[in-house]
Image (cartoon, rainbow, N blue to C red):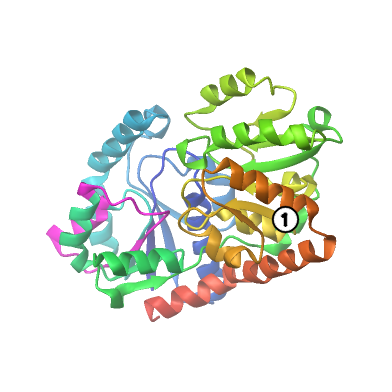
Amino acid sequence: MKIFYWSPHISHVATVTAVINSIKSLQSYSLGAIECSLLDAVGEWEDYKHEIIKNNINVKKLYLKEKYKKLPRFGFIKSRLAYWIIFFSSFFSLKKIINENKPEYLIIHLITSLPIIINYFFKLETKIILRVSGYPKLNILRLFIWKVMGKKIYKVVCPTVATRDYLIEKKIFDKKKIFVLKDPIINISTINEKKKENIDEIEQLGTRKYLLTVGRISKQKNYFFLVDCFSDLIKLYPKYSLVIIGEGEDKHKLLEYISEKKLTKKVFLLPFKKNIFNYMQKAECFILSSLWEDPGWVLMEAASVNKIIISSNCPNGPTEFLSNGEGGYLFDSNKKDSFIKKFIEYQNDNAELKNKKILITKKKVKEYTLFKHHQALVEILKI
């Protein structure tokens, strides 16, 4: 059986790891019964060549000349232009490779409109599995494509129960087609190795007690709000520093904001890291300040190294993963007073109560292993 994966991207996003791990899970636990291939639209998978070779993942290139490094990046307009370039340059090559290879399934994660449109107009024999990656924003174009052309999609998989229920409520797809499929995030043996590695900025951070957040520096992650809250927080708890790991279109603006707040010696912006578990291991706690998530991978990653989590109750994912606050500290999204109140609560709670919260999330983390993902995906596909 052949399964192809389609997930063109223009930056380091969590979906990239989800795709690689999904392929790894099928290849590891299907005993050779499933042959997976990764479709490379414009050369976007070259940065992951080492991991792809290491895990014996087959890659099928749709291009003659690599375009990825020349794509416009950062900012809404440039990123949308890059998506359209990928769309038009890959249209006929994607159609051709599917018709020639005839995979039983095509699992689509990003720039999903292209395979959906091809499937609608050219009646592919391949069954399309739409993976809803992230909290779905139902703009006019997406709503039109999903509603009109979604009838020919075989199945739709969502990362959270809340997102599944949201799509059912909106009546976009037949509810019998919609399933929850949790991301294959956790590989305990790999995490145990990575968390022991030295951190790059050991001299800069030293023995500081720091709060940690990780993610793309964009509107979604709400880091301006977090820095604003932290400026008040250190008046109560001056021993803490804040570490933000990530890249993104708002990085320079955030650096300026940190400077305006006179926090350059207390707030540290570190670049994208392939390994974040060693930073998590040394952090006092993990903070997620996002305006939306689905589900918020970093929560599971923080839980895997037994970190206390303080998170916004944004849609969709944190509330579900943290069991309505029993597995961590949930504050009202984008509300400073609520955040400060929850942080004080975290500081005042005893070790026994904190350990109970850690145990709750540790149990939930097991739902995000490669083996659990394999079991769920095979069931959904009815292999």
251 over 210 or under it: above or below: above
Is 88 covered by the magenta stretch? no
305 over 75 or under it: above or below: below
Looking at the image, residue 369 sits to the left or right of residue 355; the answer is left
Q: Estimate the x, y position of residue 72 in percent, counting from the top left.
A: 37, 28
Q: Quadrant of residue 88?
A: top left
Q: Residues within 10 Å of mark 1 (few under 14, many from 20)?
A: many
Q: Residue at x 22, y 69 (%)?
A: 125
Q: Residue 143: in sight, yes or no?
A: yes
Residue sitting nearer the eye, 88 or 133 = 133
370 over 330 or under it: above or below: below
Q: Estimate the x, y position of residue 261 in percent, counting from the top left.
A: 64, 22
Which residue of the protein is positioned furthest toward the right in this rendering? 207
Q: Which residue is mark 1?
A: 308
* Residue span colored magenta: 113-141
Q: Quadrant of the N terminus?
A: bottom left
Q: Quadrant of the C terminus?
A: bottom left
Residue sitting nearer the eye, 252 or 355 = 355
